[in-house]
Amino acid sequence: MTPPLFVPESFDVVIEVPRGGMVKRRGDGRIDFIALPSPFNYGSIVGTLAPDGDPYDAIVLGPRMRAGVTLECTALAVFGFLDRGQLDPKIVCGPGPLADADRRRVERFFAIYQRFKRGLQRIRGQSEPTEVLGWLPWTSRSSS
């Protein structure tokens, strides 16, 4: 069994793609790709490093926010995604608890996104696996 992912009690998230946005940018601001509209605000957790080498991704539920906004968040859940063979978990944030409708929205989006990313990777000549892993165990408490 996979040990739970540690997520801090609270953390700052920078919104990169507002709800409804379609442009995914790299860390330097250049366009990485244009995807399907995001049903939630998408950003990254400040000062973190995920297994894929980028900051941890954050999904912020609720109304549309402006790109560049930083806000303090707490985790509601962790959704697992494997991107080019690297674990790329999505920390789901927002007013809690996580509603079943939001849970299904996240699952549906990443099922479609997985197919999109696989097609993009074929175009780019990349063959590493990309797949949805589903909901992952997590904790906000240190295991020490």
Image (cartoon, rainbow, N blue to C red):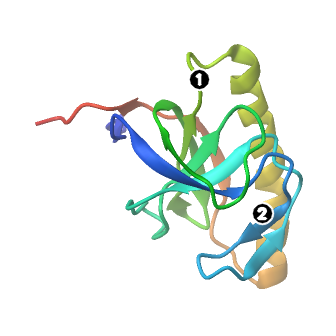
Dot 2 falls on a residue whose secondary structure is: helix
Please, is residue 83 above or below residue 90 in the view? below
Q: Amino acid at mark 1?
A: Pro
Q: Gap between marks 2 and 1, in whole Å?
A: 29 Å
Q: For the point 24% across and 31% down, which residue is it?
A: 141
Residue furthest to the left: 144
Residue plotted at (76% across, 53% down): 114
Q: Which residue is mark 1?
A: 95
Point out residue 60 in the picture as x, y percentages from the top left corner.
Answer: 63, 40
Residue 62: percent from left, percent from top: 71, 31
Residue type highlighted by circle 2: Lys
Badge 1, how many Cα within 10 Å: few under 14, some, many 20+?
A: few
Residue drawn at the location 69% of the way across and 25% of the way down: 103
Left or right: 44, with 143 as reference point: right
Camera-side residue of 86 and 18: 18
Which label belongs to residue 51? none
Splitting the image into 4 quarters, where does residue 27 fall?
bottom right
Residue lying at 86% horizontally and 59% vertically, measured from the top left: 22
State the image coordinates of residue 56 (x, y, percent, origin top left): 48, 55
Residue position for label 2? 117
